[in-house]
Amino acid sequence: MGSRDDLSDGESAAPPGGSYGGATYIGEPAELSEREHEAQTSALAAKPGKLLCDYVRVVLPDEPSVWLELDGWLGERKVRAGGWRGWYTRSASCLEGGLVAWCEDKERAKIEGVMVDLPGRACASMGARLVAFLRWALERGRCTRVDFAIDDRAGRLTHERLVAALEDGTLVTRWRGSREMVSRDEHGKRAGWCIYLGERSSEAMMRLYDKAAEQRKPGPWVRCELECKGHLADRIAREYFAKGGEVVVGQINRRVRFVEPLGEDSNRWRWPVVAWWQSFIGELEPGPSLVAGEVPACTVSALSAFVERQAGPSMATICEARGGEMDWLYALLDRCEHRMNTRQRALLERLRAERSEAARLARRDVSLVGATA
């Protein structure tokens, strides 16, 4: 068991003063629906053996001291045209896709407080500060939603295995029923999938989905996400800081198991857990393992796969239509060079450094051979 001070990734006890300069503040459109707001995902991946916090919603007292501290955590806010969720009459956007809502009526404000709602994209913009913000919020108020994610990058949670478990009864769950959604491309080939366990109206539900397809990244990358709301969210968040990541694993194991049939035993909860699920769920490190996510590595092979998947057919069509002439492609590359992002430029710098070092070592070897001769 870890202590309350075991969290890593630069967590601080208090927020830095002033606006947070690490985020790009984007005003959220007033017409964005609640479902669209909640669906703002991030491209961050959970680190191996770690939990990723991918959604945070908290309610805080509507007090001047709380607002002052919120300025340090959330930085600049852009007031929106309307309120939020019916009872909050005013709202503002913050971070990247985040939202703050409050009541103009002072008596109502005492009851509803200030709501801070940070979907995946906003959580990602806070970086390592997110875990510290959640701890601070629990000291000031309560948590009403928190999503914990564990990522499988080793190909254990395949669509075929999960669907087979649904069909043959080797998925044991306390939830009633399941739903599966599959998206397909123009050729009818599966482009993405998501399996839902539980109902959105309940305090807990789980999603197992193809994160690689969602982010249009090379796989395998499957996410197991436990969404907690209401009193359950507050309890689990507080227990996490007291006991660590095993609290979340315990909640998952309490609700979901993938098992193998055991003889004549009709109680499926006594059946042994299958190796691939045990390997996945048992990979999580004990103790406080809730940390900021990480951006998947930018590599030449990943970029090549992305270009082939997204633009390969179009490029082949253009090339054939032009009789194999390639000048258009070189012109396109010249026009797009200035649009490379920071990660792509860093990749090129790293490759140049590696090639320079390899050339230096080659020259040294040649010199040594000449000296020996």
Image (cartoon, helix red, strand yellow):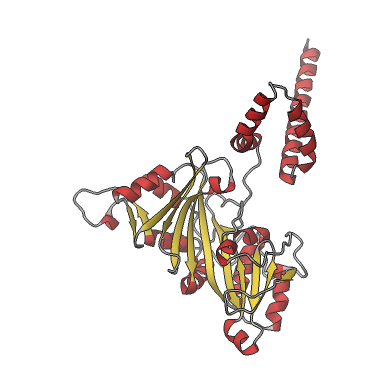
- How many marks the image carries: the answer is 0
From the viewer's perspective, is residue 166 above or below residue 77? Answer: above
Q: Residue furthest top?
A: 373
The residue depicted at 42 percent of the width and 60 percent of the height is 252
From the viewer's perspective, is residue 254 above or below residue 353? Answer: below
Residue nearest the observer in this picture, 46 or 147:
147
The residue depicted at 44 percent of the width and 49 percent of the height is 280
Q: Residue furthest bottom?
A: 107
Can residue 66 be seen? yes
The residue depicted at 58 percent of the width and 48 percent of the height is 215
Residue nearest the observer in this picture, 143 or 358:
143
**x and y percentages locating residue 351 in the rendered image:** 73, 33
**x and y percentages locating residue 191 in the rendered image:** 51, 43
Q: Residue furthest left?
A: 264
From the viewer's perspective, is residue 33 above or below residue 166? Answer: below
Say whether residue 309 is left or right of residue 230: right
Instruction: Locate residue 202: give its quadrant.
Output: bottom left
Residue nearest the observer in this picture, 257 or 23:
23
**x and y percentages locating residue 92 in the rendered image:** 69, 71
Say whether residue 272 is left or right of residue 331: left
Q: Quadrant of the C terminus?
A: top right
**x and y percentages locating residue 16 in the rendered image:** 74, 68
Can residue 274 be seen? no
From the viewer's perspective, is residue 272 above or below residue 204? Answer: above
